[in-house]
Image: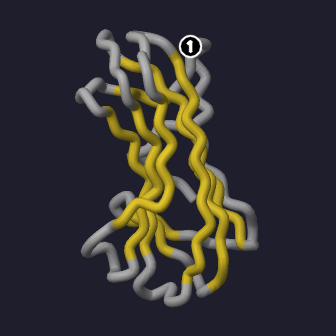
Amino acid sequence: IRDTSVTGVQTCALPISVNNSSGQFTFPHAGVFRVMSQLNIIADGSADNNVQNEIDYSTDRGSTFSDIGLQARGSDVRANAAYTLVNEAIFNVTDASTFRLRINLGSATGVTCTGGSSDGDIYTKIVFQQV
């Protein structure tokens, strides 16, 4: 699985073949899946008090999304510092033809966050595992 718009390593536990189109992931069949999103970020020249790693899902082919998991880095995200946000959730995909999933990195104050770490390596990943 490779989303060219996401910087970093993306992994998938075989034999699941999850598809990605325009940032929305679809599942190959119904079942229970664990999704883990690890986003390593570096904030730009500003500080932020709330950077979020959010897992959103849709049951209507992506027309509307709800969040099921939110991992936030509160207090003071310092400028030009590296942080890791890990979020995971369990999904019961009852209809694979309508179920969609997306991962969002957000900032409460509009700070630009990029994938990476202070040593220049990128460790951002998304893991899909059928349970």
Relative placement, left or right, of 99 versus 60 is right
Left or right: where does residue 67 sit relative to residue 46?
Answer: right
CA neighbours of label 1 inside 10 A, class few (<14), some (14 to 19), many (20+): few
The relative height of residue 115 versus residue 98 in the rendered view (above or below) is above
Colour scheme shown: secondary structure
Image coordinates for residue 109, horizontal then vertical, percent: 24, 27
Q: In the picture, which quadrant includes the C terminus? A: bottom right
How many labels sit on residues? Answer: 1
Q: Quadrant of residue 14?
A: bottom right
On the image, numbered disc 1 is attached to which residue?
Answer: 118
Residue 43 lies, in percent from the top left, at 39, 19
Q: In which quarter of the image is the N terminus?
A: bottom right
3 or 52: which is nearer to us? Answer: 52
Which residue is outermost to the front?
A: 75
Q: Residue at position x 73%, y 62% from top?
A: 13
Provide residue 56's location: percent of width, then percent of height: 42, 61
Q: Is residue 9 above or below residue 130?
A: above
Asked which secondary structure carries label 1, the reply is loop
The residue type indicated by label 1 comes to Ser
Figure check: 22 above or below 38: below
Which picture quadrant has residue 35? bottom right
In the picture, measured across the screen, residue 100 lies left or right of residue 60, that is right
Q: Position of residue 103 (x, y in %)?
A: 44, 53
Q: Which residue is drawn at 42% across and 12% down?
A: 78
Which residue is found at the position 62% from the left and 72% from the top? 17
Residue at the location (44% across, 49% down)? 54
